[in-house]
Image (cartoon, rainbow, N blue to C red):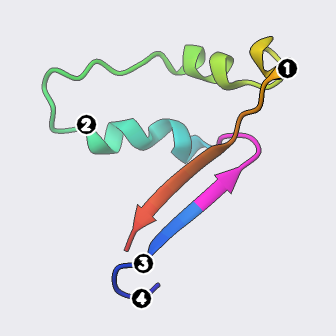
């Protein structure tokens, strides 16, 4: 990637790095309370959450070089 480029990754199912991202950006914040991963995965699961039967969802992460 060149200078000033942004890389965007899109996923059908969220990978591990999707869930671990908040730990990277809030690691220095002493007041940050991490979410329960099991709950996050349950909410975003296309098969377990009834919202996604009628709605749409797309997961993406953006990276700056």
Instruction: From the viewer's perspective, tell me whether residue 63 is left or right of residue 16.
Output: left
Mark before the other along the chain sequence, 4 or 1: 4
Residue visible at 15% across and 38% down in the picture: 28
Q: Are marks 4 and 3 in contact (CB under 8 Å)?
A: yes
Mark before the other along the chain sequence, 1 or 2: 2
Give the secondary structure at mark 3: loop
Start and end of the magenta stretch? Answer: 9-14
Instruction: From the viewer's perspective, tell me whether residue 15 is left or right of residue 32.
Output: right
Which residue in the protein does label 2 denote?
26
Residue visible at 41% across and 88% down in the picture: 2
Compared to residue 18, the image places residue 34 above or below, namely: above
Marks 3 and 1 sit apart, C-alpha to C-alpha, by 35 Å
Which mark lies nearer to you, 2 or 4?
4
Give the secondary structure at mark 1: helix
Which residue in the protein does label 4 denote?
2
The answer to whether residue 11 is magenta is yes
């Amino acid at each position: 990637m060149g200078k000033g480029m942004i890389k965007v990754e899109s996923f059908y199912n969220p990978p591990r790095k999707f869930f671990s991202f908040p730990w990277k950006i809030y690691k220095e914040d002493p007041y940050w309370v991490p979410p329960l991963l099991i709950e996050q995965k349950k909410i975003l699961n296309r098969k377990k959450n009834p919202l996604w039967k009628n709605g749409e969802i797309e997961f993406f992460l953006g990276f700056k070089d």
